Image (spheres, rainbow, N blue to C red):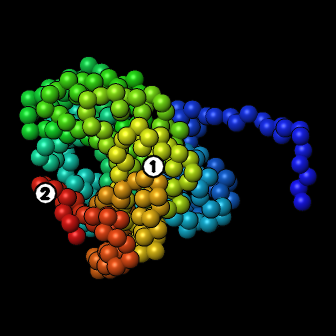
Amino acid sequence: MIPHTATPLQTTPVQTISWQDELARAISDPRKLFALLELDTATLASVLPAHKDFKLKVPHPYLKKIRRGDINDPLLRQVLPIGNELAEMPGYHTDPLAESMANPMPGLIHKYHGRVLLVVSPACAIHCRYCFRRHFPYQNNNPGRQQWQRPLDYIAMNPSINEVIFSGGDPLAANDQHLRWLTEQIASIAHVKRLRVHTRLPVVIPSRITADCVKWLTETRLQSIVVLHINHPNELGNDVQEAVARLKSAGIDVLNQTVLLNGVNARADTLISLSEKLYETGILPYYLHVLDAVQGAEHFAVKDEKVKELQQQMLARLPGYLVPRIVIEKPGAASKLPV
Ligand code: SF4
């Protein structure tokens, strides 16, 4: 039996690190990553050239969820540069969705009827190796405060646009003051009804969901929707669940999109467990994206037959509302296409 003691436990105060500091201390040196994760350094030689092409970036809260010594860990595979990325594969492109054709001015992408996407920040908290924007010309799409007027005028002059999507990079890499200002500008355009925020930041640095962040999302007449990007159930730790709870308790709808990735989540058990865990956290599984054919990511591709097989298994084992829509994006199409 554990004896009862009247003396209170001596605890050291918990050190909280701001999200900006977490962002600044993200691991960007492959050698350091290998040391922290106790990985066999024999693989480092194939990591370094790919890292030069698209830098490694992993923040600590995400790093903590990666198993030590396991080069095949599903979270590690998403962030670890590998030699295969440098092979030029037929059918894979630097701009797989032809977004340059839908980018009429810096900071704005208009692909679909009724909604536009703003490139709010060129930065991300993590570098996902399969990212369809890994070659995106952010240097041409990084408006300062003055230059935002053009995209805002574009939205104001297009009454069909009723939804604005904050994208990037990761829009939550911008500070809350800027995001509040941009939200207010958009809310002043009468025909815009909804604000959607596409972000992976609360998944990789959950402390990003600050009180200020919740405020600008809720102190607006716009309906705010946060769409997270979670690919594997191991990404959903208590810290992420608490961040989502902060959004949910403020009345914000939270959805998720996943990218189907060979070697990461392309198994029925994993996808089913992800859907279950998302729902337990208060997140609705929204989309499961077939990989966009971006140069450097071919090793993540899942064959069509396998995609259909996974879909069948999910339909057979989950209630309909937990089966995300499996979609593929094609350049120039009027919407995402169901598989
Ligand atoms: S966070 Fe999103 S935009 Fe950034 S690298 Fe990952 S997938 Fe791409």
Cα distance, mark 1 to mark 2?
27 Å
Q: Residue furthest top?
A: 146
Q: Is residue 245 left or right of residue 190?
A: right
Residue 260, percent from left and from top? 37, 65
**Looking at the image, which is closer to me, 112 or 219?**
219
Which residue is drawn at the image coordinates 64% and 49% (left, top)?
A: 32
Among the 4 quarters of the image, the one containing residue 296? bottom left
Which residue is drawn at the image coordinates 27% and 37% (left, top)?
A: 223
Q: Secondary structure at mark 1?
A: loop
Q: Tell me the residue that label 2 is attached to.
A: 333
Q: Tell me the residue that label 1 is attached to.
A: 127
Lower position in the chain sequence, tag 1 or tag 2: 1
Amino acid type of disc 2? Ala
Where is 268 relative to 246, above or below? below
**Looking at the image, which is closer to me, 311 or 147?**
311
Where is 187 relative to 241, above or below? above
- Mark 1 Cβ and ligand 1 under 8 Å apart: yes
Q: Is residue 22 left or right of residue 112?
A: right
Which residue is drawn at the image coordinates 68% and 59% (left, top)?
A: 38
Badge 2 local density, few (<14 within 10 Å), some, or many (20+)?
few
Amino acid type of disc 1? His
- Of tags 1 and 2, which is closer to the observer? 2
Q: Is residue 308 left or right of residue 297?
A: left
Residue 220, percent from left and from top? 30, 28
Where is 132 relative to 224, above or below? below
